[in-house]
Image (spheres, rainbow, N blue to C red):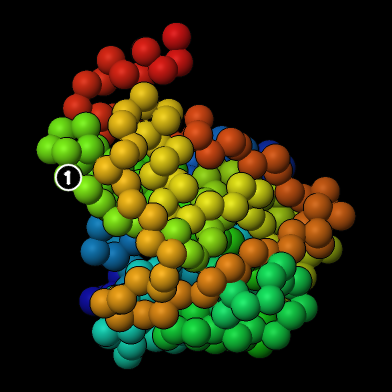
Amino acid sequence: MPGFESEQLEVNCYDPPAGGRRVLVTGASGLLGRAVLKEFQKRGCAVTGTAYRRAGPCLLRCDLTDEDAVKTLMSQCKPHVVVHCAAERRPDVVERHPEAAENINVHATAILAREAACCGAFLLYMSSDYVFDGRRPPYGQDDAPSPVNAYGRSKMEGERQTLRYCTRSAVLRVPVLFGEVESVSESAVTALWPKVLRGATAGETCALDHCQQRFPTHTQDVAAVCWNICRADDSIRGIFHYSAKEQMTKYEMALAMARAFNLPSDHLIPLTEQPAGVAAARPLNPRLDCSRLEVLGLGVEPRAFASAVCDCLWPFTPDKRWRQTVFH
């Protein structure tokens, strides 16, 4: 079948240990998907990860926009739980290529929701704080979405498809993420690192947004919340929020990185007006109210930004010995 390669099924889709579950993670080659895959493996689940363009030897290659491929995947893996991380999550790319993005963010989600319902699986759909316009924070789980760009609209529609087609489902909205990246460009947070380094190497000035408020959240914390939700899936339905608590602009994130590595920051210039030249508008402050998750005891204490971002960035420092000078 052109949309599905099943050579690794014998390796990945096996019976879990006693009391364990079969779990399917889509987008398992991505920043969040990798963390979710590791978390559920650590918990003793039999985890199958899917990817498409970046499917490695331990992942199944599956085109989630191919309905027949998804049906074959679900019928052979028979998951108890599906964590849907696959998405086009770059707002400017979505704005420039809306049809392609809608295909994966909306159409594929609808297919997966229908097939999860058919096999009785619990579906957790990963969504975004970009479903809100950021004008009246904080946003509760029941507040009406009001996205300002195509990415936010596609995630909003993905939520609707999930809840419409799969009764055993939940939506988890999260803010901008960072974690163990394969390259610093993989996260909008770690992508600031080369700009921080410019002052230490070339002495170049760099202007950074100091207007849009963000809540950078580590993927390991999100993955732990995903486990908590899926572990309690018999009682969990609807929409939930999870977010770190530190409010920062890109300029403030860059300053925190510079301080953590004892680097100069004089070259970083705060921009207090909305940045020009970007394809997609961004919400000003899409702060999420996470009380529903907290009341149920399903949240986790988010790790501090400064120490967490150090762990992510030290492999990309010009001198790896900085890790020793910072932490010892």
Residue 305, percent from left and from top: 53, 39
Left/right placement of residue 104 relative to residue 185 reads right
Most extreme residue toward the top is: 328
Residue 20, percent from left and from top: 66, 44
In this orientation, which residue lies closer to the viewer: 294 or 15? 294
- Count up the numbered dots: 1
Position of the N terminus by quadrant: bottom left
The answer to whether residue 272 is visible is yes
Residue 170, percent from left and from top: 68, 69
Dot 1 corresponds to which residue? 204
Left/right placement of residue 196 relative to residue 260 reads left
Q: What residue is at 15 percent from the left and 33 percent from the top?
A: 201
- Mark 1 falls on what kind of element? loop
Q: Splitting the image into 4 quarters, where does residue 50 fall?
A: bottom left
Position of the C terminus by quadrant: top left
Q: What residue is at 73 percent from the left and 49 percent from the top?
A: 299
Q: What residue is at 59 percent from the left and 52 percent from the top?
A: 247
Most extreme residue toward the bottom is: 99
The answer to whether residue 110 is visible is no
Most extreme residue toward the right is: 295
